[in-house]
Image: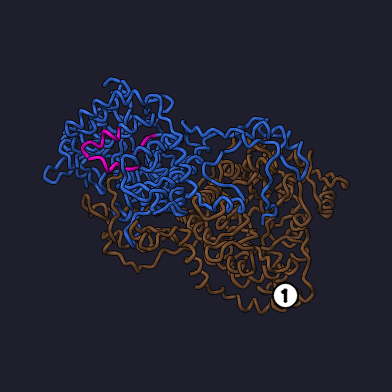
Chain colours: A brown, B blue
Amino acid sequence: MTRRRRRTGKPSNTSAKSPPRSHAYRQLKHPFEPQRVFSDDAIDRIHHKALRVLKELGIKMLHPEARRIFKSAGATVNEASQMVFIGSDIIDAALQSAPKSFRLRAASASREQTYETGSMLFTAGSGCPNAHDFERGRRPGSLRDFEETITLQQSFDVIHLLGPSAEPQDIAPNVRHYEIIRAQLKLADKPMFVYARGRGQVQESFELIQLALNIDNTEFTNGVWATTVINTNSPRQLDIPMAEGIIDFARAGQLAVITPFCLSGAMAPITVSGALILQHAEALAGIALSQLANAGAPVSYGGFASNVDMKSGAPAFGTPEHIKLSIGSGQLARYIGMPWRSAAGSASNTPDMQSGTENNMGLWAALQANATLTVHAAGWLEGGLCFGYEKFINDIEAVQTIAELCNPLPEDEDSFGWSALQDVEPGGHFFATDHTMQRYKDAFYTPLIADLSNHGSWVESGAKTSSERATAKWKAVLAAFEPPAHSATAMEKIAPYIEQGIANGGVAQTD
Amino acid sequence: MTRRRRRTGKPSNTSAKSPPRSHAYRQLKHPFEPQRVFSDDAIDRIHHKALRVLKELGIKMLHPEARRIFKSAGATVNEASQMVFIGSDIIDAALQSAPKSFRLRAASASREQTYETGSMLFTAGSGCPNAHDFERGRRPGSLRDFEETITLQQSFDVIHLLGPSAEPQDIAPNVRHYEIIRAQLKLADKPMFVYARGRGQVQESFELIQLALNIDNTEFTNGVWATTVINTNSPRQLDIPMAEGIIDFARAGQLAVITPFCLSGAMAPITVSGALILQHAEALAGIALSQLANAGAPVSYGGFASNVDMKSGAPAFGTPEHIKLSIGSGQLARYIGMPWRSAAGSASNTPDMQSGTENNMGLWAALQANATLTVHAAGWLEGGLCFGYEKFINDIEAVQTIAELCNPLPEDEDSFGWSALQDVEPGGHFFATDHTMQRYKDAFYTPLIADLSNHGSWVESGAKTSSERATAKWKAVLAAFEPPAHSATAMEKIAPYIEQGIANGGVAQTD
């Protein structure tokens, strides 16, 4: 079909030493219009069905304080059953007071982000108990893995918010929060993540950030210095640490991303519309709790909905249903006027084509849905049970490709290249035209891991898959890493606090 | 981050024996609005720059008959330089007479397609000189490979038009067209592909189709029974077999898909706008030749534009520039009101994550661009130098996932699942609800190759990548294959014709 099938030769007039195009993807705005999977009428009906869920069916809230807060606001609370029935007046007020745009602060000003509809932000695959790479194999996550994955996140501009990629299971739970905060402050200068694992750990994490970055409590409370993700226990349940997290983050002016994890067919109805009604109800309940705890506190709508395989019950990602659920979630977020978080992901056990296709489908779904934040954008394996280093590198290529779409194309006369079209004879080539020479250094995206060499050269280089090549890549990234400017000072400032905390036995996590 | 990380158990109320969801993707319509990378004003300017290219710079046409046709229509022709300068009146008339919708006929009526704006059609990776699978390795394409790849194409409904995936290099060029037609008629009942490799071979191919399907010349000429792809020799050149192909397909009422292969930075300007001006000019020239040869003949606008790596000159696919060029091509096709062909593709040498990401990006670009036909949607490796069997299977998963997006979501009350939401207690599951039980058999897409099992089961099954698993899959597809109903009769009908043709020494290809 393609008659010009030969690979073109090396262009004689360009230098192999020209600097690659910059991969600075720090401030991204969605380049495309959001798409729809439901009519506007259906979205309106889904919203109102969610309001009925909240009012008529209710949400079970295990946290007494959460129930008290809702009761004070006029909700009907059954203390025996722990059920909270939330009227639409409470939801309406919450949607009024929730801010639609806020700044995510960071150790370096250049890393700060505006969290609002239209922004396009990514985090790495997060929340994984295990880590995997081709050199060391699969293992339970350790502090070393945690630090390495923070280093990887810091090294790619297209990862905008830090996330806990690999759980440091070798650190005792009661002191783990110290190391999770320390590693982020030591190795990165991007907006930070704090686990909502109980009031004590959250408070200490906030204090550590203030200490390290030399900000007082007022400045801290007036800006978003920490973000957490709140998962509801679908269906219709909010457990103790999650409710407490919503309350504590709201009171401290920090960001809670409310994220029901609705697996259609299992913890949510088997239809896309039914799963979205549940997700929407649970997200609205979380947003309401945030705003009742502190009206005007930063909070994000969120959803991570996909389907299970109905034969095995296993969660699936990157499926048609995942895509439709993401696009529908985007419609609902726009309906209520809030920025929102989506997610990519992969069920594959290894960085293969399946894992790439699953993740790419999720990334494109988030793009179609104009998700403000796409979590798990790089490195997730096993449905989140494992963070893969080689998977991360390969996924970053996809995320960077999407980030490049945010650069608008020039429309000036010179870019149209009339002179080049005029200069090149029929059947000739454009390598040597002035138009090319002026632009060749940064005309195109420079691949991170893609190998464009021909088959012979590829075989000579060892016939490695892109995942096999990625081992050398992440090792080189780790080897070349330099900590951010504030690192040493920050470490000095927090060391005594952590030393004292450990001496005191740390703080228990809330289950 | 995700606190509910366990894989859910097997649902007790669903049967592992329930029939999988049907994968009948025969008639697809684009589900999403097309996107834009240029302002409408820039598209207008690109179109008019392309008209200037045609009128002022001209196209070199190596085929004397093509020059005569243009001269008769009033174009300025320089016989010494073989340059043809085409006025916009000729282009305008061609865009007027070119049909905007036509039916692709096929041996089975259920395989026929409407080629028009809004349709979503796919072909397999095509035009590859080599073939590869994990069992037999990489080899020059043979008739066996050609037949196997036609069988694979026939076996997946999401491949709508046949294409020559692997070139049968073990068949002499002068008789190869017999085998290319014979294999398609023997093994498939979808719209057929005919190479434009000279008048003699084209004419014989058309006669074979008529013989096999028992249609006379009038019926043949009144319907599109054969499609070819016409690549221009960018920049600004149309060679002899390609021009002859346009003329002959137009006169016979068959479809020529005009496809400049504009690699930005090499055979086309280094900017997206510049490359599109060249592509658009060349496509318009081809469309004009078609309409001058036979006004009203079926013809498709087309483009396959990507960029080269400016360090090595190697073609790249699935890049940000590829995506932007596709979306821009879609804007131009809509500007002139024509259906159009795009392409996915991969530069990778093996079915790895790189190859998946490259292809997925191209598929999504075509979706964003509302491409009527996406060529090379499954199986391309090495920038088209190799057709990969395992790559094909894995790519089909991605194409099927996209095809699923064409199924509109139900918006009726029952699908919303209020009863299920009401029935399931907080923290419970939806497996056993009536709403689930009524739908579980075909609620979700059934994966072709994705393995959703957990890490332990996956290791027990041999820890295979999705590409390694795909070997068994394509072998099973080939083993289970049954030829379509018309096959035996068609073979009988064409056997004497081919026997005689071979005895006569076949027909030379035109270079």
- Note whether A54 is above or below A201 in the view shown: above
Going by the picture, which residue comes out furthest to the left? B80
Task: Estimate the x, y position of residue A158 in percent, counting from the top left.
Answer: 52, 60
Q: Nearer the viewer, residue A465 or A428?
A: A465
Q: Mark 1 highlights which residue? A: A498
Task: Using residue B45 as the reference point, say whether residue A278 is left or right of it.
Answer: right
How many numbered circles does the render carry? 1
Task: Estimate the x, y position of residue B437 in percent, counting from the top left.
Answer: 68, 33
Task: Please identify the quarter of the rendering in which residue A206 is found.
Answer: bottom right
Residue B167 highlighted magenta (yes or no): yes
Q: Residue at x 50, y 37 (%)?
A: B31
Q: Residue at x 49, y 43 (%)?
A: B397
Task: Please identify the quarter of the rendering in which residue B79 is found.
Answer: top left
Say if residue B118 shows up in the picture: no
Q: Chain of mark 1?
A: A
Q: Secondary structure at mark 1?
A: helix
Q: Which residues are magenta?
A: B161-181
Task: Using residue B280 as the reference point, say whether residue A494 is left or right of it.
Answer: right
- Note whether A314 is above or below A489 in the view shown: above
Which amino acid type is shown beneath numbered disc 1? Ile
Task: Please identify the quarter of the rendering in which residue B265 is found.
Answer: bottom left
Residue A132 highlighted magenta (yes or no): no
Q: Nearer the viewer, residue B439 or A90?
A: B439
Say if residue B316 shows up in the picture: yes
Task: Estimate the x, y position of residue A15 in percent, counting from the top left.
Answer: 31, 67
Going by the picture, which residue comes out furthest to the right? A80
Q: Residue at x 38, y 47 (%)?
A: B42
